[in-house]
Amino acid sequence: MTRRVDPRRPALITAQGLRRIILGGTEGERDVRLGAAAPAAERRPRLAQPASACLLVVTHPDSGGIDEHAREAIAAAALLARADEAVVVVMPCADASLQLDPAALGIDRLELLPVTEATTADALADAVAERWGTLRPRLVLMPDRGDDADLGRRLAVAQGLAVAASVVEIAEGRARVRDHGAMGRASGDATASLADLDLLLVARHVARTDLPFVGRGEQLALPAPAARPTVGVQDLGRVSGKAQQVALEEADFILAAGNGVTDVALFHELAQALGAAVGASRVAVDDGRFPRSQQIGATGRTVQARGYLAMGISGAVQHLQGIRECRHVMAVNTDPAAPIAQRSELVLAEDVQNLMRALLMLVRTTPASAETAS
């Protein structure tokens, strides 16, 4: 399956057709080639001498590792770094046992910043600002999403940094920013010289991650952020929202229904019990069982959930395009040879209604059993 070219991303016309412009590519390409890099042992170190300066990347981990968006931001920093500049990554994390190879990602020094649920956004921003003041990087890069984007904007305001957000292309010493215009309507792009910028909040697919070199891979533990006193503000803690109210593009776990789901009430009951967002295939939407806003696929929404459980979905090519960036895909279908099986890590050949009833019963009884055992 070949991913479609996003018509709103920078691209050029080559003899092979329309190709996206990606940092680290020479002629443009249809997609970032993930996981195609040579083994780290076969790649040369990027730094041949001790570094006298650095580029800084700040990003949060994702389930003990880092996602593709963070990898692309790190790769962009490694590709932009000069011969005497190290790539330093500051990573706020609650668990120091991360499952990643810093050198293979192009990281010269990984600095782990310990945080807890009690660490406030202001305290974290202060700690990152302190590292920025010590390192004085030529450029800071951060993924333009969620906590990373919020932290980047806090750092820019506190230190008076020149920032570019929604950076979709970095080429020839300039950063291209998507200009959405009034009311979210695209009205063209804006560009700025990297020499005039201090911080880049980068969008997806801004750089290739299959680097031809490795970093030094050093690792350092930083002191925990100091508590910051608040005046006139009371921290009420965090309250978990309902997964069904989260936009599908931002959902962490999605339960998706296809033509094989006939008991829609049972499906929604299971989704609520699992704490999953609800999605559907085009067939299930066209049949009127689900609203158009929940359609996933080339003509619907493109999602990038950590977990995607497809119930009774055969896996048309349009649907597979919509879930191409999901990390773990599982499928339940009476046909184990359905196209969805080629994309799934786990396939259960079972009637969807029977499995939903059994899974719902298991979800409801497991917590009670755990409490009884304790």
Image (cartoon, rainbow, N blue to C red):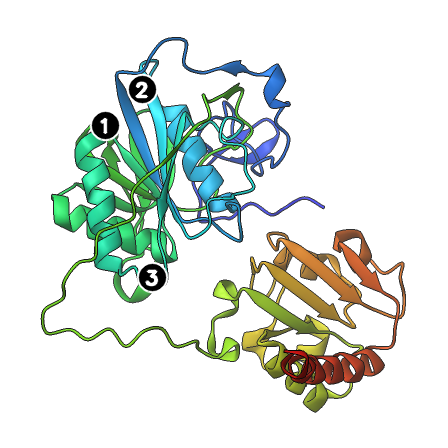
Residue 270 on image: x %, y % = 67, 82
Judge whether 188 appears above or below 269 on screen. Answer: above
Few, some or many C-alpha atoms within 10 Å of disc 2 (few <14, some 14-19, many ≥20)? many
Measure how far apart labels 1 and 2 are at the Cα level: 9 Å
Q: Which residue is mark 3?
A: 185
Q: Which residue is farthest front?
A: 374
The residue at 52%/68% (across/down) is 248
**322 displayed left or right of 338:** left
Q: Is residue 213 visible?
A: yes
Secondary element at image label 3: loop
161 sits to left or right of 22: left
| Residue identified by numbered label 2 | 85
Query: Circles 1 and 2: CB distance less than 8 Å?
Result: yes
Q: Which mark is residue 138?
A: 1
Residue 51 coordinates in the image, percent (x, y)? 31, 16
Q: What residue is at 74 percent from the left and 80 percent from the top?
A: 362
Tell me where residue 355 sits by quadrant.
Answer: bottom right
Specify the amino acid type for callout 1: Arg
Mark 3, other Cα within 10 Å: few <14 / some 14–19 / many ≥20 = few
Quarter of the view holding residue 345: bottom right
- Tell me the SS state at disc 2: strand
Q: Is residue 331 left or right of residue 63?
A: right
Query: How many other residues sit within 10 Å of disc 1, few (<14), some (14-19) or many (≥20)?
Result: some
Is tag 1's residue or tag 2's residue first in the polypeptide sequence? 2
User: Residue 251 at x, y = what percent?
Assistant: 52, 66
Q: Is residue 159 above or below residue 86?
A: below
Sequence-wise first label, 2 or 3: 2
Screen quadrant of the C terminus: bottom right
Is 231 in front, or is 246?
A: 231
Amino acid type, residue under disc 2 in the picture: Glu
> Is 50 situated above or below 218?
above
